[in-house]
């Protein structure tokens, strides 16, 4: 495989691979947003219960997705060495592990009502959330398998098909929601259960399309991905497991930081929580760009790592960091100069409390601009470390940065020093800053210094 060696050529290669991945991440966000909007149309209680159920699903999914995320770097490294057999072995065992985790998670989904009530949720919401999860839980296996196949195809630089399948899934989800939540087009009106069915069908559709593409695309057939799929490969199984579980816990630590921030913002006030939700959605959109670039850099750097080419690895790393930094500066400029129009997209001026939400949201976007650089740096560093198959130390760095530093800093600034919601977000900046600096230092000192 010929590799580019100049910064300009490498930037083009990263963008060609990264832009479809960015698009697929944004399309996945659209799917989540449409679910929220359509359930909001159906009823407040339905919306609240599915937000609760979907949050529980997401936390379990993040934990199990480490195998799918981790195998991306392993595949890229095997391709760099020209080892097609290893590509098949690692991908197959990642599929095994993901399916196994999904099956083990099903009892948690099925008996989620008592778990949610034990966590302080209202009984009526917990019961509805369980109704949702008893159906959506069957989508955990296909959702995790999709993660593995996305990594496999992206590492093979077939990221465009990932984008198109994600867009098709988003469209199918909207149509199924319209039919099954509200009872349109002759379908039964199922409410929360309809949303769960739509989500599960969408996930099954996604894994079927990606698997068919991987199995039947002529230039990919020589990998024989599904040939004798039932045969275990315990050496590859162990390697994927050892690499993947720390990634799942790393993602859980980061998502836990933002979930804790939402809970604490709720203690401050309803207006502040509404503004927080809007600002988080804006920050999530910009993060998807950095995540897509990070995925592309994992693949490009993984090729270099597989060949043992340290000089090329350094070029890929600097290129990815430069691209992410450039977008972060653009996002900062937009957030600081156009906060009103951005927040206004989420508000109806006829509603009450629009003015205080707009004012507080503007202040939060200024803080979000501050953590853009650190959020970009930490996800890029994680992508580079995964490329060189270094996942356990980043897990501990994330746990310490987010849970031992970020969350206490948010609480102390918000409540101890009386800074309220702004202090809470400044605590997020502290956690992200520590993570970004520590992870970057880990990569440059350990692999590319």
Image (spheres, rainbow, N blue to C red):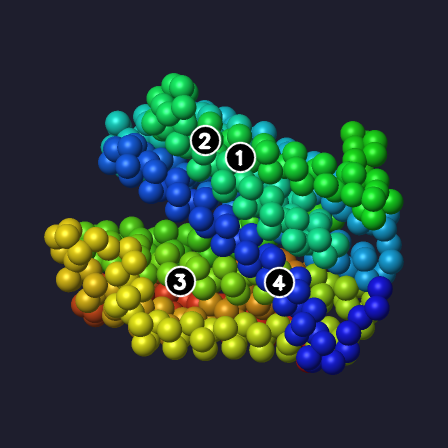
Residue 115: x and y in percent read: 37, 31
Residue 27: x and y in percent read: 50, 50
Query: Which residue is more in the foreground, 256 or 133?
Result: 133
Q: CA–CA distance between discs 1 and 4?
A: 24 Å
Dot 1 falls on a residue whose secondary structure is helix
Disc 2 + disc 1, Cβ < 8 Å: yes
Locate the C terminus and report the quarter of the image it occupies. bottom right
Which residue of the protein is positioned furthest toward the front in this rendering?
Answer: 185
Q: Residues within 10 Å of mark 3 (few under 14, many from 20)?
A: some
Dot 2 falls on a residue whose secondary structure is helix
Could you tell which of marks 4 and 3 lies nearer the N-terminus?
4
> Quarter of the image holding residue 276?
bottom left
What residue would you read off at disc 2?
Answer: 176
Disc 4 + disc 3, Cβ < 8 Å: no
Could you tell which of marks 2 and 1 lies nearer the N-terminus?
2
Q: CA–CA distance between discs 4 and 2?
A: 30 Å
**Which mark is nearer the camera, 3 or 1?**
1
Could you tell which of marks 3 and 1 lies nearer the N-terminus?
1
Query: Which residue is more in the foreground, 66 or 276?
Result: 276
Query: Which residue is more in the foreground, 322 or 349?
Result: 349
């Amino acid at each position: 495989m010929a590799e580019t060696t100049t910064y300009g050529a490498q930037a083009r290669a990263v963008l060609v691979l990264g832009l479809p991945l960015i698009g697929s991440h944004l399309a996945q966000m659209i799917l989540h947003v449409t679910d929220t909007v359509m359930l909001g149309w159906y009823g407040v209680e339905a919306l609240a219960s599915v937000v609760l159920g979907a949050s529980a699903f997401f936390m379990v999914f993040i934990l199990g997705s480490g195998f799918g995320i981790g195998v991306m770097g392993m595949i890229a490294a095997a391709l760099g060495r020209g080892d097609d057999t290893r590509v098949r072995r690692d991908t197959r065992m990642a599929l095994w592990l993901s399916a196994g985790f999904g099956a083990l998670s099903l009892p948690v989904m099925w008996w989620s009502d008592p778990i949610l009530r034990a966590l302080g949720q209202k009984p009526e919401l917990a019961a509805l959330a369980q109704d949702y999860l008893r159906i959506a839980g069957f989508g955990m296996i296909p959702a995790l398998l999709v993660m593995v196949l996305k990594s496999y195809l992206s590492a093979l630089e077939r990221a465009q098909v990932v984008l198109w399948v994600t867009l098709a899934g988003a469209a199918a989800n909207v149509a199924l929601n319209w039919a099954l939540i509200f009872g349109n087009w002759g379908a039964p009106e199922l409410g929360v259960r309809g949303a769960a069915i739509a989500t599960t069908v969408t996930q099954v559709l996604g894994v079927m399309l990606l698997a068919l593409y991987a199995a039947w695309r002529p230039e990919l057939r020589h990998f024989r991905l599904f040939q004798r799929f039932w045969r275990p490969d315990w050496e590859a199984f162990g390697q994927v497991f050892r690499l993947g579980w720390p990634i799942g816990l790393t993602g859980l630590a980061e998502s836990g930081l933002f979930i804790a921030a939402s809970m604490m913002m709720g203690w401050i006030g309803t207006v502040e929580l509404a503004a927080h939700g809007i600002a988080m959605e804006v920050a999530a959109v910009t993060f998807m760009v950095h995540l897509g670039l990070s995925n592309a850099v994992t693949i490009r750097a993984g090729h270099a790592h597989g060949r043992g080419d340290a000089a090329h690895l350094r070029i890929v790393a600097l290129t990815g960091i430069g691209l992410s930094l450039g977008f972060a500066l653009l996002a900062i400029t937009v957030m600081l100069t156009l906060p009103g129009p951005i927040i206004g997209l989420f508000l109806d001026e006829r509603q009450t409390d629009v003015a205080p939400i707009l004012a507080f949201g503007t202040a939060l976007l200024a803080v979000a601009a501050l953590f853009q650089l650190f959020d970009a740096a930490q996800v890029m560093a994680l992508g580079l470390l995964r490329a060189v198959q270094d996942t356990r130390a980043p897990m501990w760095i994330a746990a310490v940065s987010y849970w031992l530093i970020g969350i206490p800093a948010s609480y102390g600034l918000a409540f101890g020093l009386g800074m309220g919601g702004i202090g809470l977000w400044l605590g997020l900046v502290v956690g992200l800053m520590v993570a970004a600096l520590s992870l970057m230092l880990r990569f440059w000192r350990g692999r590319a210094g």
